[in-house]
Amino acid sequence: MNTFLKFAPVRSQKAARRAYTLIEILIVVAVLGIAGAMVIPAFAQTGVLRVQSAVRMIVADLTQAQSDAIAYQQGRGVKFFVNQKQYKIAMARGTTLDFTLDLLDTRSFVAEDFGHSDITAVNFNGGDTLVFDEMGSPITAAGSGVAAPNGTVDISGSGQIFRITVEAYTGRCTVANVTPPGTPIP
């Protein structure tokens, strides 16, 4: 008796089938079409996400300046330059705030990484500079000791406007989207 024939695999019609049917191909194409329809609008939102990253960078730097003021027991100031896409952070020496001699950092968002963001409005006690005292509280001027009222910075880009509010006494930062309703997102 031949043992080779005894153990040879039996071919069936199902084992011989190796191609996809037209129905299977149509189902795959339909699923890919639905997935593509959901993904493409998400790519349009990347500009807004880049502007939000600029907002997060500002909030992080304000929090860092406040923390440094507490840690080093020395005031910090943050000066915003409207329509120049930058702000500077400096340490306060007594009643002076010199953004040349005591400069700690300069931040700019001129790159596309921030969705062409711009600082469009600033209001800290009627000016463009936020000052933290050695306890981390916002004050009206370096060395003044007078608590500043709430202050705001508006950041715009990609058809969106975000407002950063720095609260009086605590320096807590909150962010709100203040884009007028019905504004199209480019």
Image: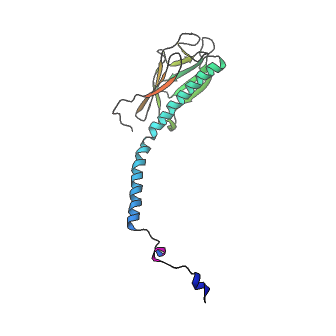
Q: Is residue 5 magenta?
A: no
Residue drawn 54% across the image and 21% down it: 79
Q: Quadrant of residue 177?
A: top left
Residue drawn 41% across the image and 64% down it: 24
Furthest residue in direction left, as rendered: 182
Dividing the image into 4 quarters, which one contains the C terminus?
A: top left
Looking at this view, is 170 or 153 the one in front? Answer: 170
Magenta residues, as a range?
9-15
Looking at this view, is 87 or 147 the one in front? Answer: 147
**Residue 148 image point, x, y percent:** 51, 14
**Residue 120 image point, x, y percent:** 44, 26
Q: Quadrant of residue 3?
A: bottom right
Dividing the image into 4 quarters, which one contains the N terminus?
A: bottom right
User: In the picture shown, does residue 120 fall above or below 38?
Assistant: above
Looking at this view, is 9 or 144 the one in front? Answer: 9
Q: Can residue 79 be seen?
A: yes
**Residue 126 image point, x, y percent:** 46, 15
